Amino acid sequence: MSRFPALLTAAAARRPRAVLAVIAVVTVVLASFAPQSELSNDSTAFSPRNTEVEALEELRDRFDDTSTATLQMVVTGDDVVSADGLVTTTAIVEAAESSFGDSLAGASGGRAITTYLDPAIDRIEVDGLDVGSVDDATVEELQGAGFDGVPPAQADLIRALAAGDDPGAAAAGIVLIQLDRSAFADDDAIAEAQRAFIDDVDARDLPFDAAPFSNELVRAPDDSFQQEVARLFGLAALVILVVLALVLRARSGPVLSRVGAVRRSLADMALAIFGVIIAIAWNTGLGVLLGPSYLDLIGDPTPPTQIVPILLLALGVDYAIHTHGRYREELAHGRGDPTAVAGSLGRTVGVALTLSMVTTGIGFLTNLVSPLPAIRDLGVLAATGIFAVLIVDLTFLVAGRTLLDRRAARRDRLATLEIEPTETSTLARVATVGLRPAVTAPVVVLGIAGAITVGSVVAATQLDTEFSPVDFLADGDPSKDAFVALDELFSGGLGETTEVLVTGDAVLTPAAHNATAGVEAGLVGQAGIVSLDGRPDLASPVTELAAAQRVAEGVEQTTAVDAAVAAGLQPDGTIAEDGDVLTVYSELAGAFPAVDAVVSPEPVAGTEGAAVRLTVRTQSESVGVETVRTAVDDSLAPLDAAGVTAVATSDAIVNDLTIDALSDSAVSGLVITLAAVTVLLAAVYWFRSRQAGLGALVVAPVGAVVLNTFGLMWVFGIPFDPITAIVSALVVGVGVDFCIHLGERFIEDLDAADGDVEIGLRQALRHTGAALAGSATTTTLGFAVLIFGSIVPFQRLGLVTIFAMVLSLLAVVFVLPAMLVLYGRRRTADRSDDDGEVGTEGEVGGGDLVGVVGD
């Protein structure tokens, strides 16, 4: 623990130019991988590995090139069944036909594009009217009359596309656009095509707003998300620079003029900031190397992992402040030339920083037990980033400062008094406010802290859990606006589908095929299942084979149907008991794309055997995901009886399972994190000084901080989500960092004070106070800027981090000093006993605590 930082700082101090050259080469190499990083917001990246996620992935592998992608354009206005609504809707249709062309896919009623105004549009075309010449009353009249002659199922769909019960007046309407997935390379290509279409719509200056929503747009966020993250990072850097200017401010004096003091302050600030930027560049490259394209240890970048650079900025500056503070103190006290002082940092502050890095890294790596891939990846990237921060801090910062101060020493311009940390500074005074109560009434301080923590534990049990990939869209993103409108006005809209993957040895049997007809019967009248003309909007092998016979046109399709009938196909889509299912599927698949979308006779890469798919349109927002899932699961009984495996899945189901996993992992994650860090620190302090109890003592206040943070989350109505899920690791990492620095310095200053606990604690607080308060301020303000962002989970994290940092500072100012007083008194008493002196009860104090953390 001590040799590692000592070697780094010694090398940086003795060969600063060589070290800086190595850092430059490593930075260039790792940064060159950064452009390969591609952001993904796929819901499966957040969900635990389970049957539903695996089924969803297999469905995509087998059927993505034969299925359709749904884009919903939500038109909003005072009354969208109007002349302005007509102009807006027809313009959207024209833009879709122009942008998508042959990639449009025939869907409900044979239409690739279905709008809430289809009855009026059809009548206008029949009557030869000009869209721009009709007024509101005419549109309303045509809309009502146009339903005559529309097939009942199609009429039901059109009515569902208008908000409200009155088809002649609605505050919003949907234009439903179906795209053929086989026309695109992947989801990213679909999203890119949809964005081009959206740009076309925006350029038309329509009378009503039209907001887009599709799963592809959510899964592959546009540049607005990255731009928002970059803006927040820049704002955080600016705020931290202001704090650094105060913390690292040099004074004018015998050596430095005012200009020189400013130059010295700016140099230290630059070393701190550039060091963090280098570490972030390293970590970005490492993220790519650890990702799917290389080592495949983590997944693609996700929105939660984009918080890592801001986290490293805050924590990296924290490390730099402690390093600068100890360097300045040693140099000012005349303990050597710049090279010697810089080289010695590894044996002083370097040990505390290394210990902090290890504990923080372990805190984040405990996220590896999380069932959510995105959280596991965040833990890995945060841990590697913290390691990179430490390496850069002990090399780049030390080498840079050594070079600058060597030159100053040669010119006899080395500043000492001007950079000496002042123990009477405002930050140092803030850090010592808890000294008096800690010395005079430590048990009372701990009792109050314990009572507050118990209350927070009770409050934390009431925390809600939320998750939706849409949360990571920035406020003002059209897709987020559309999602809100779909949720509030259309019970989630008509873009949601629940799919069923059917696999097993008996898939290609008439019994399994015919059982899908029983699934349709089981879905009739169920809540959350979209019905058209009294029947569920379901696509299954039976429904598609029946439809193929009804719509067969041309020689190819007629021949295919005849061959299928000869193999046992019945008019209702079922297959005779002695029929040949594989032949029926094979004959129809090539001639009817809809059959390809529900049948996969042969395995694809990563799958086994045959499979079929059932797709039903659902609205889980109106009744709840569990209700929809139960309805679908219950309808699958005929398939179970036929001897096949049927798994219902959807993005909504996967998201719901993610929420359950988040709730379950909240407590377990905290326990594992605290246990791992406690064991590590106990071992370290045992091997260093045979004081294992000091490890538990250092961690105890941090555990209270986490619990109190959860309590404040409940008070302010902040739910547990994939971002706030990292709060345990973040608080443990930062909080233990604070406690380690004070604990390490306390032991050092206690020895220097010959065992006088009050003097040792006062000196420790004064020596580390400014750095602790300064690092707490930089971390708090660095994360606080997230509140001003437009991404909801980041806003929540910003507020939660403020809670955590304020509580951490209070813990290190009040709670830990009280514990150190009791610990120090016991330590002094034990030493007196070893020397033949008997310690008094008053010297020990707080016997209960001594029993827990004693040697």
Image (spheres, rainbow, N blue to C red):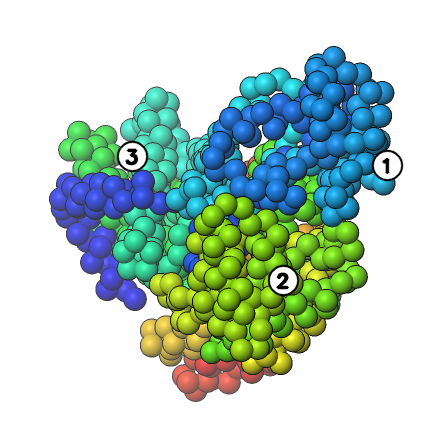
Image location (x, y in percent) of residue 139? 79, 23
Q: Circle 3 sits in a helix, a strand or a loop, which is it?
A: loop
Number of residues whose C-alpha sits closer than 10 Å to that of mark 1, classed few (under 14), some (14–19) or many (20 or more)? few
Tell which circle, 1 or 2, labels the residue nearer the N-terminal end.
1
Give the residue type at disc 1.
Asp
**Residue at 22% across, 55% down:** 8
Question: How far separated are the C-alphas under marks 2 and 3?
Answer: 95 Å
Mark 2 sits on what residue? 571
Q: Is residue 451 left or right of residue 682?
A: right
Q: Relative to 448, is 229 above or below?
A: above
**Residue at 71% across, 24% down:** 126
Q: Relative to 651, is 39 above or below?
A: above
**Residue at 24% across, 62% down:** 4
Q: Specify the label residue 415 is tagged with.
A: 3
Q: Circle 1 sits in a helix, a strand or a loop, which is it?
A: loop
Image location (x, y in percent) of residue 496? 64, 51
